[in-house]
Image (spheres, helix red, strand yellow):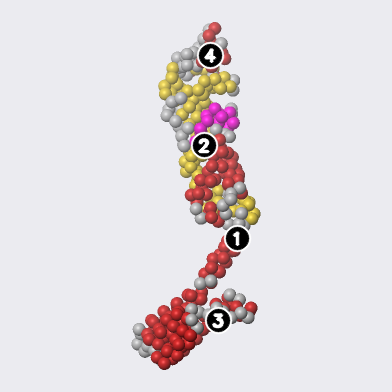
Amino acid sequence: MGLGDFLRKQLVDVIDWVDEPGVLAIRYPMQDREIQNGGQLTVREGQVAMFYNEGKLADAFEPGQHTLTTQNLPLLTAIMNWDKGFKSPFKADVYFFTQREQTGLKWGTPQPITVRDKEFGPLRIRAFGSYSFRIEDVATFAVKMMGSLDRLTVTDLDQQLRAVINTAIATALGGSEIAFIDLAGNQQALSAKIKAEVDAGFKEWGLTCRTFFVESVSLPEDVQEYLDKGSSMRVLGNLDQYAKFQAADSIQTAAANPGGLGGIGASAAAGLALSQTMVSGLRGVGAAGVSPPEADPYEQIEKLHKLMVGGAITQEEFDAKKTALLAKI
């Protein structure tokens, strides 16, 4: 070994690391892993530094500036038998871990996930959103994720984290007593429910899920079509009332225009009759041969009065019909 190589080894007496975006942990680069006795170790806020000897954890350091001696390296001192004679420099691997929150991460279901819904049965869904995490248990993370790697990034863990999220979605929705359609309508509740499952999965690796948001949920086309038809039928259920309202509103509008109602009285009455026939057909009344329920007499009298005021019927016709309707009450 030349003099230059010897001096370079002796100059490894300041150890520190500046966080890099997306980097979770590094092994500090040192020639032959040799560290000066009395060297300075700087651990920045949000970091943890760990010393390893032959792959086994020896000592850990929290944020602060530390002078490396046998006094603050107790485990390494015991392993190396330094109490019987300390040699400088000494060899050890130094790893830095950041515990800062990793934010702005996206998740999604590349393939539809099958869940069992209480209302629809087996259901295949797609979902997308964002999340964040941080290293919570550094020792567990170091053993299960870092191992002997020189560097570990968020990108390196992406596939593993997505797998946990997809499993969490299936678990959270598959065992839910709340119908999926109700959960999907409240994305905050859905996000919280899935986050609890994600956090449990992340914990196995020493991670914690800090935030989890569901931003989009899509159902299979056939299920969505079924829901759309259900909405349409609920609208058709009110078609009778809507048609009556439209007819009465048209008469009042026409009465305020020049020419009055003389020319549209018959067409308005025909339109009202046609709308009632359409509603009966939609409800299956005509096919079943059952007469539609009679309209409320008071409601009919009110509409007849509007027709009389508009000039579509005479006073005598109104009085006669009114008497007949009141007789039914």
Residue at the image point whose x is 48% and y is 39% from the top = 210
Report the residue marked by disc 1.
223
Q: Earlier in the sequence, mark 3 or mark 1?
A: 1
Query: Residue flagged by tag 3: what amino acid is it?
Result: Thr
Q: Earlier in the sequence, mark 2 or mark 1?
A: 2
Query: Residue flagged by tag 1: what amino acid is it?
Result: Val
Report the residue marked by disc 4.
77
Q: Nearer the viewer, mark 3 or mark 2?
A: 3
Tell me the distance, in whole angstroms, between the alpha carbons under discs 2 and 4.
33 Å
Q: Residues within 10 Å of mark 2 (few under 14, many from 20)?
A: many
Q: Main secondary structure of the magenta part?
A: helix
Report the residue marked by disc 2.
208
Residue 76's tag is none
Report the residue marked by disc 3.
277
Residue at the image point whose x is 48% and y is 27% from the top = 48
Residue 268 at what x, y percent from top left? 46, 85
Q: SS class of the residue under badge 1? A: helix
Residue 273 at what x, y percent from top left? 51, 84
Depth check: give the residue in front, 92 or 107: 107
Q: Earlier in the sequence, mark 3 or mark 2?
A: 2
